[in-house]
Image: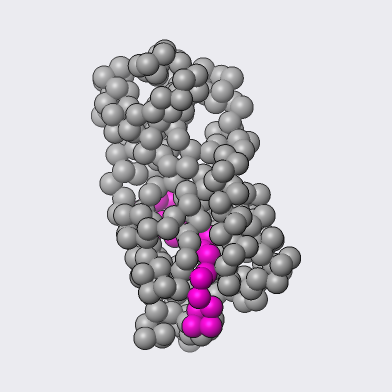
Amino acid sequence: MNAAVFERSGEVAGAERLAAWLSRHRNVAVITGAGVSTGSGIPDYRDGDGNWKRSPPVQFQDFVRSERTRRRYWARSLIGWPMFAAARPGTAHVALARLEHAGVIDRVITQNVDGLHQRAGSRKVIDLHGRLDVVRCFACGCGEGRDVFQSRLLNANPDWGARNARVAPDGDADLDAADYGAFEVPACEACGGVLKPGVVFYGEPVPRERSEAAMTAVLMAAGVLAVGSSLMTWSSFRLVRAAAERGIPVVAVNRGRTRADPLYAFKCEGECGAVLSAAIDAAT
């Protein structure tokens, strides 16, 4: 049996087990990560062992304190945003929306910032790490759409619009050896303050209301399904750990190692969309 056939047979077996589990558990809370959106063309940060594939993302304190870091971030975002914004829901997003509409899933808690769950039809979504399609001011809190801010970035830096780069996670782009010194970052139009994307950076706490809503959804669930996440970040791992400590069964669909491997009732190894779709087919 070649590797591709072996992997596919493993996905089918895992899907059948997942289908049986879902049939016994209603009111499931789902925690999703980057692996759900790779099928939409948005790369993930980590490899199968949970290690960084590329340089770690911007740290919150660096963004706050360093004008150079902000210039670098927004220059790369200017290039990456059109590709990110053009992404469409993939098989995994559609499958999870179907499970919600069927009354199996009660809540999706996503670490992703792409809004693809909502675009696929999921209605009960907690954007744990925020959304990239909005920009907010540190000083006054005023916000504007990312598309609007994209126009302001291009007007301030017309020579950057024609640059090509490799798409990176979270609307970023890999620009090798670029000089960001002359890049202009527009200020808040209301107060002149510093603007930040509406996402939680590494080193930045998740807003309390959002964090508490996610924890409540997990602790009220009959089961927890982690999909496409290594759970290396504390904000997501703490949810799975809390469920396991209270005897709430946790299962996972993922390729490779995760931080919560010892806590699962079982794990389905495979591509998220393929496993979830096969699970739905097996249950119908």
Q: Left or right: where does residue 155 sit relative to residue 118?
A: left
Q: Quadrant of residue 164?
A: top left
Q: Position of residue 198 (x, y in %)?
A: 45, 35
**Between residues 186 and 222, which one lies in front from this camera angle?**
222
Residue drawn at point x = 31 percent, y = 50 percent? 87
Magenta residue span: 22-43
Say if 131 sits above or below 195 in the image.
below
- Asked whether residue 121 is drawn in magenta, I would say no
Residue drawn at point x = 62 percent, y = 76 percent? 266
- Asked whether residue 28 is drawn in magenta, I would say yes
Number of labels in the image equals 0
Say if 36 sits above or below 280 in the image.
above
Residue drawn at point x = 32 percent, y = 59 percent? 120
Say if 260 sits above or below 140 in the image.
below
Residue 162 seen in render: yes
**Between residues 250 and 273, which one lies in front from this camera angle?**
250
Say if 139 sits above or below 18 in the image.
above
Residue 160 seen in render: no
Residue drawn at point x = 59 percent, y = 33 percent? 59
Q: Position of residue 89 (x, y in %)?
A: 33, 58
**Between residues 100 and 169, which one lies in front from this camera angle?**
100
Q: Position of residue 126 (x, y in %)?
A: 48, 52
Q: Left or right: where does residue 268 sit relative to residue 275?
A: right
